[in-house]
Image: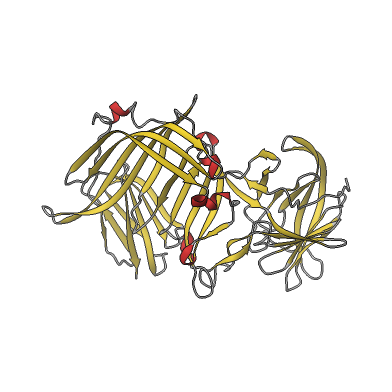
Amino acid sequence: MSQNYQLVHDHLPAYYGEGSVHTFAIDSSSEFSDYTVFYGFTTIRDTSLWMDGWCLDSLGGGWMGRVLVQSSNKTSILNFNGDSIHYYQQTFPGESHLFYTWPNGNYVEATHFQSTYDEIMGVMDSVKYFRLNVFNPAGDSIFSEINGLTYTLSKNYGLVSTFDNYLFPMSYNYQSELSGFSNPVTDISNMDWQDAFNFNIGDEFHIRQENFYWAYDEEDSVTVQGKITVDKIRIVIGVEQLSDSIRFSYKECWRSVDASPISIDTVYVADTIIDETITRQSLEWMDLYPGQYHEGSWNNYSLVSQNVTYDFNSRAIKNIKFNAIEGDTCLAYTIYCPEHMVHRYIEGCGGPYYSYYIEFTSPSRRLKYFKKGSEEWGVPIAADCADLLSGTAEVYSLQKSPIVYPNPFNGRLTIKTETGTIGQIRVYNISGNLLYQSRKESQFYIVNTSLFLSGIYILEIRMEDGCIFRKKIIKK
């Protein structure tokens, strides 16, 4: 079991993860007499240690680091601080080697504790298992959450199970499994713009777009929330695939309902024919690997991700998260704040389908149903255009906005509604992290906020009828 294992293959972008996909791909490499230096692609990473304010590094390293030095028996990965993490390839069960050293002299050892033949990506392969343990400079074992962390090394595929090496030892909780390569194709591969718009004549898509807004009720002198819902049925009637573009035509009907407690206005549009052209240039970020970023105009950055879910019949999904804005010394942290937008493209179903938060309302555009040949997913919005335009498919209702007081608050926050029933309360910080939630069917809530620090929070109120209200609240 002492074969010459290799952690890196410059022609095989590796995909790790399950629901969310992490990618390691080589940007370039340099060959020397007894070792090779690999350079991974740059991406947006948070290397602020979550202490000295929010800062994103646009030139950060990917999930497997920014620079790797590989020889016949060792691969060294440089983390965000430029410190080395050492993976030894030619080892026997029971052997240990230095894995990482802190500036204070504490160090991590990796012990080769098991060797087997396992099935990796459908192929039986020679596999080694390693376990990490932390020691002080005197060689005494010391307590650490890193103790017991494991990684797996395969002869043909390199790292099969590992963690975020670029952020190690700051972060080590997100351990993922090897999921595939793009060349040769095994399991997961990188979805590109042609994969997303792989339409066929007869493909049917049902799309719902919702947009919340605020309106003033002069009769009751209160502000109420309204919602515009647009339901569309779209059927592809023509497709032309070219080298740098895809032209397609579809027949579409739709119904728009503008609903608030004040009034309900409905618009119906019968079958129309729409021609659309998708170009590779307009979707240049779609060819990027998950984890890379796309730099737009005006110094804005967008982070690309890809995942496979149980939704959409497990079709691949490519996301681009907007929008980090360049500051004086680093990227502003807006990419993870509530005010962000996500564009989503689904394999064979096009896009963008999107959701985002602006001023604490929730516009969205979602795929609700598709039919491609004999394959179906989701629940149809209506049986057909005649059903959609009949005006009987759905009843829309909205509650008046719940009352929240006092705001600003100090110790307790009171929430009540005169119409409808509150189903759930959630409170987020300005970074979008969930801090508090409570679920009970009631028209009256009291939230104890004594443990909250002074600052701005987002209160989310979910009504039993499906309506969602978001309010900015301030702790003194």
Q: Is residue 248 above or below residue 328?
A: above
> Farthest residue in the bottom direction?
328
Dividing the image into 4 quarters, which one contains the C terminus?
bottom left
Which residue does the image show at 29% across and 46% down from the upper left?
A: 442
Asked whether residue 59 appears in the rendered view, the answer is: yes
- From the top left corner, tell me how far across and down residue 435 is, in percent: 44, 58
- 179 relative position to 282: left or right: right
Q: Is residue 288 above or below residue 18?
A: below
What is the image's colouring?
A: secondary structure
- From the top left corner, tell me how far across and down residue 67 is, in percent: 72, 63
- From the top left corner, tell me how far across and down residue 204 is, in percent: 42, 31
Which residue does the image show at 88% across and 50% down from the upper left?
A: 92
> Farthest residue in the left direction?
219
> Farthest residue in the top direction?
374
Total count of labels: 0
Q: Quadrant of residue 65?
A: bottom right
Asked whether residue 449 appears in the rendered view, the answer is: no
Dividing the image into 4 quarters, which one contains the N terminus?
top right
- 424 relative position to 110: left or right: left
- From the top left corner, tell me how far across and down residue 341 is, in percent: 43, 54
Q: Quadrant of residue 275?
A: top left
**Of 364 and 272, the residue lying toward us:** 272
- 79 relative position to 432: left or right: right
Which residue does the image show at 48% across and 60% down from the upper left?
A: 335
**Of 241 and 132, the residue lying toward us:** 241
**Of 374 and 249, the residue lying toward us:** 249
- 298 relative position to 18: left or right: left
